Every structure is written in structure tokens, then in C-alpha cells.
């Protein structure tokens, strides 16, 4: 199985085009790198080599059953992982989602959508790190900090699931090298917080099932996971499964079962009542309106219908991204259920708890692909990977229980090697800007199973990257493709109009600016760009109206205040112009402030 996965990685590394499969990321590395990584991995899983290594490692792996040795190994894993998190952090140039979150935090998190406590944590950390000179420092800190919590909880879970050192090596190795750990490499989203909270819930649940205590810890972990993000509510069925065996004999278990959903309801009621201005009457309504449609026709934000091949391809791709053996976890769950039959909850309590956590998140991944497609929301269903991998390892450990120690270590070494190769290629892609850009371009290719909205959004990001690098022809092509993919993308149209204007294509620019304002009258950028174009044509009254509309929508646009003053001065209204410039000084950065002061001090 490990050799098969490694072979797929090597074959996919030679493919080109819109292949978004989870093992295709090796294709973005230089071919000698991919060949070297895959060759070393294949060598390690060959029986003669793996057998020799397993023989040498077996004593060390067996000692992981001792508490002191296990703790030392866990600390080493966490320290090494932190170094890897920093090395493989997401490149800042593709942090548009982070930019949106930063804007939301600056605006008192009005656009929190389905985030509840996660956005509050980001808000607090963002204020703490505001003086570091990096707009994304807080997001890197939160994601890597969440990774520490996640790793500690997962290694604790493995320790609670089995006392056997070789089994801990297999389970822990598969978890640590899972693709979902990409969440913690400086990922610019709130999902790492949800993943860490669910990891704590899994640790509490396995300990309750194994030891029969810790009911209140389980209830508290369920509340924290549910409060982080609205999808965290899906852990609540697993609370019942974990406590079921003790409900008849423990009043504490019954109280914990009742307290968890009541506390979750209280949190969301408080959010609803205290922040009614955030997104209207129902702060979560727009989020849950975006399920995958049963049938067509599709609009710009829908990638496919529920019962379609592209949807199936996307789901399988998403699972492979999360970890190469996630799909095997589903098979393991079926095998464990069939073996126990109706007594599954009694005979396999750990597996039953994991299945009860897996199923709701798996249904979410099947039914809900928000606006995007092509595994673009993988982070929200990353929780599928943890119970899947643990189920696979749990089943494998049970099946291999009669094997000799070195043989079991050999199996663990082979599977972990394949999983590590899978993770390494993914991380290395994002560790270098050029590789990350090539991968992003492929994900936005015509053949990828994405919605028109998602493809246009990705092409817009590519255009922005080219602009920052000074590659204007490439940026223009990317924005042209973005507008062609989704003509309703007003931001892309506005940016393309700016590029056209800079290149002297004024009529085309003006047409795009007017179309932007028509499509999105609520977008301040559209009015600002149109005002600039009108001012260049000496149409000052029309330009003044557009600048004022842009400032009504975004009063903090200091450049709009500067240009509005210039338009007013051109009409002979110097006093009004100076009032506009002074208003701009209240929101200006130092560079713009110098220009505003110079304009105020200039003679008539």
C-alpha cells in the first residue's frame, strides 16, 4: 500500500495540466527533487531495507510504551514540527484571505460569517502583535500556536488509545505526517483554531471511553469546539456516544451530556443578541445557503451538482490532500462495524466514538462546498482526516497484534514514509514563491472542477502577484482571464481597468470602470477608479460625485480625499479643497500625509 502511494506521487509528478489531485503537488518541484524524494521513499519501503531499519529501530519504538520515553518523544516531535511550520509557512503574497480577515478585524469583525470565537481570538492576537510591522504576523502566530495544541492533543490521544510502543509509533507517525498539518504552517485562516479545539475534544473523548472519567472535560471541549466555528457543532453527537455506556450509572455523565448542548445554545444566542448589526437578522444564514445543489443549472458560484462526477472527483481529491490513508479509514470503519455488528458500540467503544465524529464531518464535506469547488474549502472539513487516520491505524494495530515486534515496526515505517513524502511535497511547494505560483495557476486552469467565481478569484490573485513583481503584461493577461471567467467579478474588472488606463487604453478602461460601478455600486474601489478616469479627462463635476460616493462607502481612503481636493481646486473651490485635505490627514499614512500637507501649504 505504501509503495502504491509513492508510485502515484512519482507518476503524478510528470503530469501537467489541471490535475488537482492531492499527490500532484510533487509535479511543481524540480524533477530531480521529486525523483530523489520518491526514490528515497521507495527505498525505505522495500522489504530488505525496511526490514533492516525496522530491526534496528524496534527496541526504540517498543520503549515508546514507557511514559518517560513517550513524553520525550512527544516533545521532540513538537519541537521539530515547529521548525518545519516556520520553514514551510504560507507565502505572504497569496494571503488575500488573510487580507480580508485583517480588514474584518480592523472593522470590529463585522463580517465574521460562521466564525464565532475563532475570529475573537484572531482579533486579540492581532492587537497584541500590531507593532511587529507585519500585517500577517498574528495569523502565523495563531496557526502555529494551534499546531502546538493540536500536536500535543493528538499525541496524547495516541497514548490513550494504546499502551504499546510500536502501535504508538504507527498511529502517531501517521497523524503527524498527515496533509491536514498544512493548516499549521502559517495558514492565514481561522480553521487552525477549529482543528486544535476538535483535537482537544478527541483527546477528552478517547480518555472518557478508555478510562470512564473526565466527563466534564469532554463537555467543555465540545463547547470550545462548537464555539470556535459553527461547523464545530458537529462534534455534539460524539458526546452522546462517548458517554452512552455511563449514562445509566453516573449522574455526572448525564449532567455533562445535558450541559454541553445547553452551553453551546447559550453561546450562539448571546452572539445573536449582542451583535445584531454584524450581518443582519441572521448572522449565519448566508453561510448555510451555500450547499451543493442537487441539480442544475449552475450559477457563477456553483462548481457542480451533488450527484456528478466532478463532485466525486473533488471529494476524493480533498481526502487525498488531507492524508494519503484517509480513504482507508472509511474502509477500516466498515470492517470494524461488520465484525462487531449490533454490539459495535459496546465491543469497539473507541472506534464507535471516532465513527460518530467522522460521519457528521464527512456529510458536511459531501453536501457543502461553499462557492468554490476543487477542494478550496478543505480546511473546514479537515476534521474528517483525524478520525479517519486514527480508525485506519486502530484497525491495522488490531489486525497486526499477532505479528512479531520488528514486523509491526516495519509496517509502521513503510506507511509513515509514504505519508511523510505526501506532506513534504505539499509543504515544499509553498516554501518557494515560484513553485507556489505555478501550483496556483494550475488550480485555476480551465479544466479544474471550480466554479466560475472561484476561478476568477484565483486569477485575480495571480494578477495581483504579477503586479507586485512588476510584471504588467502577465498581470493584464491574468485579469483579462479573470473577467472572462466571471464577468460579474467587479474587483477584477476595476483592476483590469486600472491596468488599461496605465497602458494608455483609456476608452477600454473607462468602459470597465462604468461596468464595475453598475455591477457593484457598493464597492468603493469602483467609484474611486471611475473618478480618477473622469478627472484625467477634465470631467471634474462627474469626478467629484464619484469621489464623494467612494468616500461615503470608505471614509478611510486618504487618496480619495487627496484627489477630491485636487478636483475641487481645479474648479476654483480652494477652501473646500483644503477642508477635504485636512479630513484626509485624519486617516492618512505618513506618505500620503506628506502629500496632503504639501497640497494644503501650496499657494493658490
Image (tube, rainbow, N blue to C red):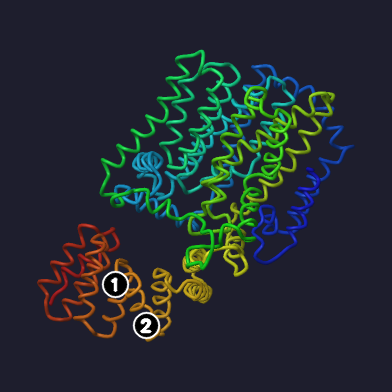
Q: Residue at x 59, y 38 (%)?
A: 358
Location of residue 571 in the rendering, given as x and y in whole percent from the top left corner: 15, 81
Q: Quadrant of the N terminus?
A: top right
Most extreme residue toward the top is: 249
SS for dot 1: helix
Q: CA distance from mark 1 to mark 2?
A: 13 Å
Q: For mark 2, what is the residue?
A: 511
Location of residue 583 in the rendering, given as x and y in whole percent from the top left corner: 17, 62
Left or right relative to 46: residue 246: left
Quarter-of-image position of residue 593: bottom left
Q: Residue at x 62, y 59 (%)?
A: 435
Density class for disc 2 (Cα within 10 Å; few <14, some 14-19, many ≥20) is few
Residue 527 badge: 1
Q: Is residue 297 above or below residue 256?
A: below
Left or right relative to 307: residue 280: left
Density class for disc 1 (Cα within 10 Å; few <14, some 14-19, many ≥20) is many
Q: Earlier in the sequence, mark 1 or mark 2?
A: 2
Most extreme residue toward the front is: 342
Location of residue 191 in the rendering, given as x and y in whole percent from the top left corner: 48, 44
- The mark total stands at 2
SS for dot 2: helix
Location of residue 586 in the rendering, given as x and y in whole percent from the top left corner: 20, 57
Amino acid at each position: 500500500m505504501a509503495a502504491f502511494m509513492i508510485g502515484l506521487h512519482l507518476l503524478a509528478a510528470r503530469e501537467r495540466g489541471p490535475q488537482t489531485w492531492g499527490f500532484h503537488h510533487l509535479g511543481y518541484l524540480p524533477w530531480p527533487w521529486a525523483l530523489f524524494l520518491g526514490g528515497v521513499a521507495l527505498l525505505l519501503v522495500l522489504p530488505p531495507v525496511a526490514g533492516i531499519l525496522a530491526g534496528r529501530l524496534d527496541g526504540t519504538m517498543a520503549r515508546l510504551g514507557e511514559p518517560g520515553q513517550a513524553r520525550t518523544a512527544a516533545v521532540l516531535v513538537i519541537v521539530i514540527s515547529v521548525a518545519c511550520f516556520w520553514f514551510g509557512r504560507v507565502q505572504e503574497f497569496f494571503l488575500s484571505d488573510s487580507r480580508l480577515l485583517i480588514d474584518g478585524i480592523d472593522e470590529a469583525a463585522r463580517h465574521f460569517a460562521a466564525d464565532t470565537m475563532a475570529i475573537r481570538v484572531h482579533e486579540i492576537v492581532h492587537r497584541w502583535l500590531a507593532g511587529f510591522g507585519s500585517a500577517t504576523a498574528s495569523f502565523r502566530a495563531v496557526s502555529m500556536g494551534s499546531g502546538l495544541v493540536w500536536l500535543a492533543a493528538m499525541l496524547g490521544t495516541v497514548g490513550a488509545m494504546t499502551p504499546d510502543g510500536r502501535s504508538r509509533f504507527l498511529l502517531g507517525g501517521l497523524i503527524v505526517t498527515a496533509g491536514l498539518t498544512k493548516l499549521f504552517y502559517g495558514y492565514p485562516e481561522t480553521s487552525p483554531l477549529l482543528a486544535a479545539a476538535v483535537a482537544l475534544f478527541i483527546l477528552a473523548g478517547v480518555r472518557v471511553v478508555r478510562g470512564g472519567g473526565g466527563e466534564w472535560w469532554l463537555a467543555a471541549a465540545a463547547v470550545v469546539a462548537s464555539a470556535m466555528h459553527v461547523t464545530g457543532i458537529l462534534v455534539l453527537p460524539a458526546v452522546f456516544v462517548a458517554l452512552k455506556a455511563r449514562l445509566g450509572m453516573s449522574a455526572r455523565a448525564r449532567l455533562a451530556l445535558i450541559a454541553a448542548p445547553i452551553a453551546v445554545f447559550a453561546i450562539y444566542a448571546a452572539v445573536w443578541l449582542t451583535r445584531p448589526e454584524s450581518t443582519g437578522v441572521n448572522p449565519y444564514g448566508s453561510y448555510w445557503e451555500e450547499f451543493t445543489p442537487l441539480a442544475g443549472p449552475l450559477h457563477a458560484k456553483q462548481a457542480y451538482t451533488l450527484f456528478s462526477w466532478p463532485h466525486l472527483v473533488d471529494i476524493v481529491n480533498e481526502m487525498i490532500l488531507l492524508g494519503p490513508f484517509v480513504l482507508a479509514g472509511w474502509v477500516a470503519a466498515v470492517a470494524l462495524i461488520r465484525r462487531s455488528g449490533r454490539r459495535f458500540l459496546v465491543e469497539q467503544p473507541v472506534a464507535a466514538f471516532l465513527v460518530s465524529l467522522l460521519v457528521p464531518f464527512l456529510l458536511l464535506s459531501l453536501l457543502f462546498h461553499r462557492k468554490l469547488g476543487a477542494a478550496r474549502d478543505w480546511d473546514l472539513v479537515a476534521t474528517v482526516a483525524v478520525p479517519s487516520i486514527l480508525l485506519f491505524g486502530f484497525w491495522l494495530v488490531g489486525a497486526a497484534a499477532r505479528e512479531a515486534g520488528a514486523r509491526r515496526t516495519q509496517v509502521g515505517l513503510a506507511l509513515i514514509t509514504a505519508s511523510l513524502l505526501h506532506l513534504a511535497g505539499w509543504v515544499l511547494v509553498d516554501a518557494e514563491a515560484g513553485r507556489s505560483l505555478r501550483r496556483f495557476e494550475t488550480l485555476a486552469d480551465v479544466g479544474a472542477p471550480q466554479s466560475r467565481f472561484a476561478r476568477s478569484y484565483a486569477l485575480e490573485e495571480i494578477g495581483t502577484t504579477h503586479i507586485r513583481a512588476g510584471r504588467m503584461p502577465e498581470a493584464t493577461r491574468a485579469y483579462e482571464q479573470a473577467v472572462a471567467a466571471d464577468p460579474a467579478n467587479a474587483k477584477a474588472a476595476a483592476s483590469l481597468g486600472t491596468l488599461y488606463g496605465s497602458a494608455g487604453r483609456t476608452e477600454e478602461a473607462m468602459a470597465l470602470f462604468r461596468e464595475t460601478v453598475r455591477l457593484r455600486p457598493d464597492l468603493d474601489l469602483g467609484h474611486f477608479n471611475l473618478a480618477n478616469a473622469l478627472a484625467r479627462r477634465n470631467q471634474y463635476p462627474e469626478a467629484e460625485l464619484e469621489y464623494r460616493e467612494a468616500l461615503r462607502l470608505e471614509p478611510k481612503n486618504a487618496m480619495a480625499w487627496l484627489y477630491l481636493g485636487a478636483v475641487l481646486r481645479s474648479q476654483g473651490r480652494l477652501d473646500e479643497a483644503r477642508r477635504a485635505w485636512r479630513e484626509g490627514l485624519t486617516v492618512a499614512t505618513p506618505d500620503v500625509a506628506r502629500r496632503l500637507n504639501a497640497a494644503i501649504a501650496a499657494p493658490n
